[in-house]
Image (cartoon, rainbow, N blue to C red):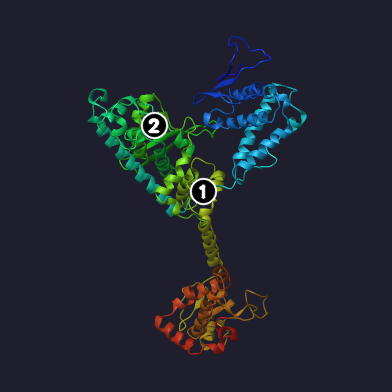
C-alpha cells in the first residue's frame, strides 16, 4: 500500500515493487509511519480480520506522519483504540476473516462507545478522545472507498459522540501553596539522593576490574561491567558459583540503579523541572540533550518542543542557572550528567534515558506510563496525607504543577494580565491561568477592596468636632461656625450625632425629613460627632459586636460592616484615649441608653 511522504504500509505477502492487488486471501497487517520524532511500526498481524484491518491501516497511515495532521508519535497512540474497535467487531462476527469495511454499521460504533463509557469513570476524557480518533479514522477509510460505507454508519460518523459528551472546559486548579511547596521540596530531595547514588556507583565502578578476569563476586567489578556494557538483565549468564546474583542484594535492579536512572526516578525529575520552570508536562518529557542554550550572566535558555503550538512548535524559556538545584539550569545540567552514560550506550539524543526492564531506552519516546509511579512516590513522602482545596487527599497531576507555578507568577504580578501573559494571549492567560479556584479568595478580596475604595471616594469621612469646636477629622467638608455650635450645644441632635439639616438630607428630597435608619448618620455628610455623642456611638458599636454571634460573617458585614468601620476608624480614633475611656464608662453605666431605641439596649437576641 502506497502513501504520501513519511508514511508507508507493509503487508505480509505484498509485492513492494508494485501496487498490491486485491486478492481473496490477505496476509497479516503491519504498517510503518514516519513521524517527526522517529519512525514507528504498528503490528496488527494478530487481528483476525485482515480486510477490515487493512482498510483502517490505510486510513491511519494517511492521518499520521511528518506532513499529516498527527505529526508526532505520542499523539498517535490513540490508534490503539482503533485496534480495540476492530477486535470488538471481529469478536461478534461469524466469519471474521471475511469482515470488510462495508460490513460495519452504526451499531458497532455505538456499542464501542458504550464499552468505553463503562470502562472509564464519569468525568474522564478518554472515551471522548477515543471516539474522536475512531470517527476520524472511519471517515478517512470511507473517503478511500467511496460508496462502501453503510448509510447508517455514514450518518453516525458525522458526529463524534452521542453518549460521552464533550468534556467540560473547566481549567485545572493550582495546588494549595503549602502543598505545592511540599511537592517541590520532596522532588528536589529525591533528585539529590539519586545524584548521590549514581556518583557513588561511579566511584565503585572506578575501583573495579573486568569481572571475566577478576571475578563476579566483587560488587566493584560488577559495576565496572555495567558501566562499560550497559545494564544487566535477569537472563544475563551467571557463573557456576553464583557470581553477580549473590554479590549484590536486590538482584538486577539494584545492580543497574547504581549507575542509571530507573523508571521511578523519572517522577522526581519531572516534578522538579515542572515546579521550577512551569513548563508543560509533555514539553518536559520531550526535552533533548542539547536543550540548554545561550548561557549568560547567571541565566540560560531551555529550548523545547511544544507540539500543540502549530507553526510555533520550537519554543524556549529563560531560567536562572547555577550550582543549586533551585536553579532550573542547574537541575537540567545535573540530569544531563546523570543520563549521559545511557545516551552514550544507545546513541540517543533525548535528555531522559532510563534502564527499565534491564534495557536502556529513551524514556518517553515509546509512551512510557510514568504515572504508574505517581502513587508510590506520593505515599513514600506522605504527600498523599495532605489535603486539597476541597478537603480530599492530594493526588499528583503534572498539569496542576504548571498551574501552581503560573499561579505564583500571577500573584507576583499583582493580577495584572499584561505583566502575567507571557507566551499566551491575554484571553488564554485570564481564562486558563488567572480564573481558577486557587485565586477565588484573592479575587473576592480584590473586589471587596475595590468597593471599599470606591465607597471611600464617594463617602467622605465622618465630621468630628472637639469640645472647642475645632475639627478633629481633617476632612475638607465645610462646617459653618453655627453648625459646630449647634452640635456642641445639642440643639440638632439625632440618635447618634448632630444633624446639620434634618430636612436637607442626601437620602430624600429637600424639605422632607431624613428617612434612613439611625445608623445611617454614620454614612451621612450632614452628621457631626462630638464627645457628647461618643457614649451612644460606643454603645452602638458594642451592639454591632454582639451581633457577630447572631449572623454569619458575610451577613454581619453586609448589615453592620460599614458602620463598624466608620466608628472604629473614622470616629473613635479621632478622640483622645482618655475621652474614649470616659465615654465607654458612661455607655456601660447606662447613660447612653436613653438616646438609643430599646432593641440596642437588650443585647443579642
Label 2: how many Cα within 10 Å (few below 14, some 14–19, many 20+): many
Tell me residue 401's x, y (percent): 46, 46
The answer to whether 538 appears left or right of 244 in the picture is right
- Report the front residue among 558 and 499: 558
Tell me residue 560's x, y (percent): 56, 73
Label 1: how many Cα within 10 Å (few below 14, some 14–19, many 20+): some
Up-down relation of residue 520 to residue 88 (above or below): below
Which quarter of the figure is the C terminus placed in?
Answer: bottom right
Q: Which residue is located at x 62 percent, y 30 percent?
A: 82
Which quarter of the figure is the N terminus placed in?
Answer: top right
Question: What label sits on residue 594 in the rendered view?
Answer: none
| Quadrant assignment, res 341 | top left
Disc 2, SS: loop
- Report the front residue among 119 and 177: 119
Tell me residue 580's x, y (percent): 43, 82
| Quadrant assignment, res 232 | top left
- The alpha-carbon separation of the residues under discs 2 and 1 comes to 44 Å
Up-down relation of residue 18 to residue 164 (above or below): above
Q: Residue furthest front?
A: 240
Question: What label sits on residue 355 in the rendered view?
Answer: 2
Instruction: Let me know if residue 428 appears in the view.
Output: yes
Q: Which residue is located at x 54 percent, y 51 percent?
A: 436
- Report the front residue among 318 and 379: 379
Up-down relation of residue 598 to residue 406 (above or below): below
Q: Which residue is located at x 47 percent, y 36 percent?
A: 283
Disc 1, SS: helix
Tell me if label 2 and label 1 are in contact, CB under 8 Å.
no
The residue to which callout 1 is attached is 417
Instruction: Let me know if residue 597 appears in the view.
Output: no
Tell me residue 519's x, y (percent): 57, 78
Amino acid at each position: 500500500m502506497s502513501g504520501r511522504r513519511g508514511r508507508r504500509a507493509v503487508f505480509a505477502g505484498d509485492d513492494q515493487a508494485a501496487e498490491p492487488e486485491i486478492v481473496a486471501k490477505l496476509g497479516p497487517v503491519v504498517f510503518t509511519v514516519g513521524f517527526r520524532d522517529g519512525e514507528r511500526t504498528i503490528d496488527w498481524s494478530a487481528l483476525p480480520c485482515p480486510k477490515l484491518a487493512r482498510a483502517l491501516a490505510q486510513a491511519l497511515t494517511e492521518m499520521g506522519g511528518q506532513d499529516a495532521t498527527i505529526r508526532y508519535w505520542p499523539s498517535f497512540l490513540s490508534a490503539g483504540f482503533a485496534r480495540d474497535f476492530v477486535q470488538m467487531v471481529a469478536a461478534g462476527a461469524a466469519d471474521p476473516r471475511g469482515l470488510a469495511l462495508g460490513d460495519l454499521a452504526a451499531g458497532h460504533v455505538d456499542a464501542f462507545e458504550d464499552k468505553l463509557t463503562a470502562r472509564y469513570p464519569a468525568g474522564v476524557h478518554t472515551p471522548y478522545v477515543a471516539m474522536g480518533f475512531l470517527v476520524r479514522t472511519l471517515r478517512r477509510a470511507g473517503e478511500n472507498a467511496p460508496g462502501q460505507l453503510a448509510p447508517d454508519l455514514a450518518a453516525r460518523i458525522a458526529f463524534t459522540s452521542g453518549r460521552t459528551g464533550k468534556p467540560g472546559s473547566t481549567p485545572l486548579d493550582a495546588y494549595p501553596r503549602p502543598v505545592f511547596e511540599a511537592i517541590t521540596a520532596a522532588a528536589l530531595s529525591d533528585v539529590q539522593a539519586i545524584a548521590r547514588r549514581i556518583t557513588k556507583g561511579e566511584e565503585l565502578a572506578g575501583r573495579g576490574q573486568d569481572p571475566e578476569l577478576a571475578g563476579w563476586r566483587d560488587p566493584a567489578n560488577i559495576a565496572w561491567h555495567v558501566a562499560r556494557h550497559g545494564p544487566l538483565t535477569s537472563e544475563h549468564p551467571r557463573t557456576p558459583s553464583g557470581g553477580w546474583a549473590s554479590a549484590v542484594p536486590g538482584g538486577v535492579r539494584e545492580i543497574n540503579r547504581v549507575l542509571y536512572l530507573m523508571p521511578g526516578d523519572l517522577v522526581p525529575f519531572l516534578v522538579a523541572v515542572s515546579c521550577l520552570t512551569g513548563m508543560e508536562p509533555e514539553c518536559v518529557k520531550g526535552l533533548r540533550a542539547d536543550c540548554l542554550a545561550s548561557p549568560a550572566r547567571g541565566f540560560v535558555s531551555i529550548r523545547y518542543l511544544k507540539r500543540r503550538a502549530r507553526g510555533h512548535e520550537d519554543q524556549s524559556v529563560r531560567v536562572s542557572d547555577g550550582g543549586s538545584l533551585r536553579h532550573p539550569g542547574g537541575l537540567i545540567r545535573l540530569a544531563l550528567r546523570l543520563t549521559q552514560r545511557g545516551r552514550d550506550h544507545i546513541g540517543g539524543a533525548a535528555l531522559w534515558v532510563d534502564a527499565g526492564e534491564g534495557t536502556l531506552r529513551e524514556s518517553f519516546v515509546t509512551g512510557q506510563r510514568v504515572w504508574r509511579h505517581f502513587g508510590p512516590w506520593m505515599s513514600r513522602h506522605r504527600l498523599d496525607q495532605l489535603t486539597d482545596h476541597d478537603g480530599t487527599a492530594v493526588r499528583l497531576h503534572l498539569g496542576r504543577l504548571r498551574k501552581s507555578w503560573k499561579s505564583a507568577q500571577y500573584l507576583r504580578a499583582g493580577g495584572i494580565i499584561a505583566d502575567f501573559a507571557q507566551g499566551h494571549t491575554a484571553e488564554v492567560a485570564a481564562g486558563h491561568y488567572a480564573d481558577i479556584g486557587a485565586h477565588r479568595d484573592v479575587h473576592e478580596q480584590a473586589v471587596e477592596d475595590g468597593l471599599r475604595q470606591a465607597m471611600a471616594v464617594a463617602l467622605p469621612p465622618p465630621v468630628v468636632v472637639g469640645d472647642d469646636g475645632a475639627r478633629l477629622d481633617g476632612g475638607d467638608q465645610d462646617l459653618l461656625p453655627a453648625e459646630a455650635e449647634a452640635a456642641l450645644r445639642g440643639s440638632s441632635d439625632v440618635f447618634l450625632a448632630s444633624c446639620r439639616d434634618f430636612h436637607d438630607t442626601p437620602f430624600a428630597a429637600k424639605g422632607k425629613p431624613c428617612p434612613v435608619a439611625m445608623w445611617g448618620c454614620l454614612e451621612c455628610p450632614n452628621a457631626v460627632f462630638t464627645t457628647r455623642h461618643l457614649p451612644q456611638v460606643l454603645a452602638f458599636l458594642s451592639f454591632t459586636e454582639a451581633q457577630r454571634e447572631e449572623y454569619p460573617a458575610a451577613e454581619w458585614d453586609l448589615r453592620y460592616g460599614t458602620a463598624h468601620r466608620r466608628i472604629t476608624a473614622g470616629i473613635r480614633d479621632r478622640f483622645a484615649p482618655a475621652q474614649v475611656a470616659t465615654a465607654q464608662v458612661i455607655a456601660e453605666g447606662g447613660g447612653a441608653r436613653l438616646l438609643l431605641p430599646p432593641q440596642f439596649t437588650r443585647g443579642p437576641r
